Image (cartoon, coloured by chain):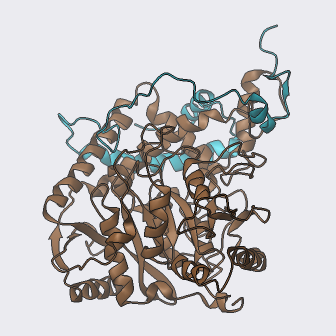
Amino acid sequence: MKRHTVKELQNMIAEQSISSEEIYQLYLNRIKAMNDSINAFISIESDEISPSSEQESSEIKGIPYALKDIFCSEGDKTTCGSKMLANFVSPYDATVVKNLREKGTVILGKTNMDEFAMGSSNETSFYGNVHNPWDKERTPGGSSGGSAAAVAAGMAPIALGTDTGGSIRQPAALTGITGLKPTYGRCSRFGMIAFASSLDQAGILSISAEDAAIFLEHMAGYDQKDSTSSTEEVPKYTDFLNNDLTGKVVGLPMEFFDGSLDSKYQGLVSESIHAYEKMGVQFKDISLPNIKYSVPTYYVVAPAECSSNLARYDGVRFGHRSTENTDLDSFYKQTRKEGFGPEVKRRIITGTYVLSAGYYDAYYLKAQKVRQLINQDFLNAFEEVDVIMGPTTQQSAFKLGDKMDDPVSMYMNDIYTISSNLSGVPAISHPIGFVDNLPFGMQVIAPHFMEHDLLNIVHQYQMATDWHLQTPALCREFD
Amino acid sequence: MTIEKSDIEHLCGLSKLNLDEEEQSLFLNQMQSILKMIKELEEVDTEDIIPMAHPLQMSQRLREDEVTEFNERNKYQKNTNSSEDGFYKVPKVID
């Protein structure tokens, strides 16, 4: 079976050329054949109940998807890539999972990820790193690396991920697929294991922007169980997919084009800008003066929230529990020592430091003020342009092991993506070509709740180009 | 602002996390470079800037005070092997 988009599967089901049960089985077979070499899935849900006739009829009924192992799905193991949750079975569905289940979609399995979503290469997973289907010696990116690799390799037509600092867009760019981080609050965070609550957002990794539009409508929306979810009406995103781009004004921030991008990648970015110009898009140079502080701001705010959120893993009610228990204090300390990996431990310690007495004002409060300035830069820019474009990453997929010893160098992977999380604006990455047989991605950023605009822009590009349809050579062995 | 080994030990206590000697010295080095990066923020003028606590300008939403969830203790306690009679067991706290 070749790689299919959700749109193609919808048509196949509608034409009755294949049943949804057959589709589910075909993907399961493909996962079973490929997972040993890619390691995209931590668990395979081969006993998922096939969509029943009781479920409402919907346009996505019978479409299978891969679910990042950060989302609770009732009755399934949910590890969050950690030893801490190795035996945790979700007692309930995350709201986005529940929403999709009610529409008749089926979970194929839970995908590999950096431990508690902390990482940009999928190498911090307790369950081993994921291999990039384009080159198995390389990272698929992270933290939603399993979801990205699964879609790129055709092990799932579409996958859910989460994005706290680029964890959907960066892996999408590195595996040659489309990755959408919606506006903060667009999708409920209930049942999505918390890393940094003011930054975390659920989103989609798919072959095309059209597929993301199809799924987002059914995932998004206000949820009483997440007080930070938005009541903003969810549009029918697919209704916006055929809007002409003539007259659209796109900002190119000089800070993203400061000469630091290698010329081989810059060439691809220029080509895609040219392709957009042919569609009637106008480009305008803009400045986001505080964006250079995104990475340091993020690495104060995210660890601070992480240290607070991960306090819940105490070994008492769920999760790993140390058997070396002399007294309560050492029981907690030992449980957490055994359950967490090094990246998570370092972030807990860093977060505790920036929040501790005497340092709170100098670090945390300062970072939250700079965050306000970064947000203001976006709001100012959107007064003059419709969307902002730039590269998603500074390079294509790097070799596994290359950056593991130097956290600051690893953190710099997210230099272009982090600012959208700090501001809460939606952003999408889409493939724009290849350098040395490795895909490279371009990011489009829009004002809050303008996902329909992002999806339409990328859809227009994907109608005119076929970068998003390129498949890794490895896939053909299994087609 | 520099960070020392004694700080790491103090932070381990605050965050209820044991680290072995090797991890402590590794983290000390790594945190020094992370803090050096974070130090860049000092150059930004943030006079009169209101800290951004949340990406959306929204107020906390309240709901009617009605029971919406029911007690599912048995279901939730399936995730531990150390409960008894509906209670969670922990090491002895009071002598």
Of residues A327 and A13, which is closer to you in this image?
A13
Location of residue A247 with respect to B95 vertically, above or below:
below
Chain rendered cyan = B
Can you name the residue that lies furthest to the top here?
B95
Q: Residue at x 54, y 32 (%)?
A: B7
Would you identify the image quadrant in which residue A347 lies?
Answer: top right
**Left or right: A322, with A137 as reference point:** right
Q: Residue at x 51, y 38 (%)?
A: A225
**Percent x, y of residue A78:** 70, 51
Chain A rendered in what hue?
brown
Q: In this rendering, does residue A243 appear at all?
A: yes
- The N terminus of chain B is located in which quarter? top left
* Residue A204 x %, y %: 50, 64
Question: Is residue B69 found left or right of A205 in the rendered image?
Answer: right
> Which residue occupies the foreground of this view, B41 or A57?
A57
Residue in view at x 26 percent, y 51 percent? A374
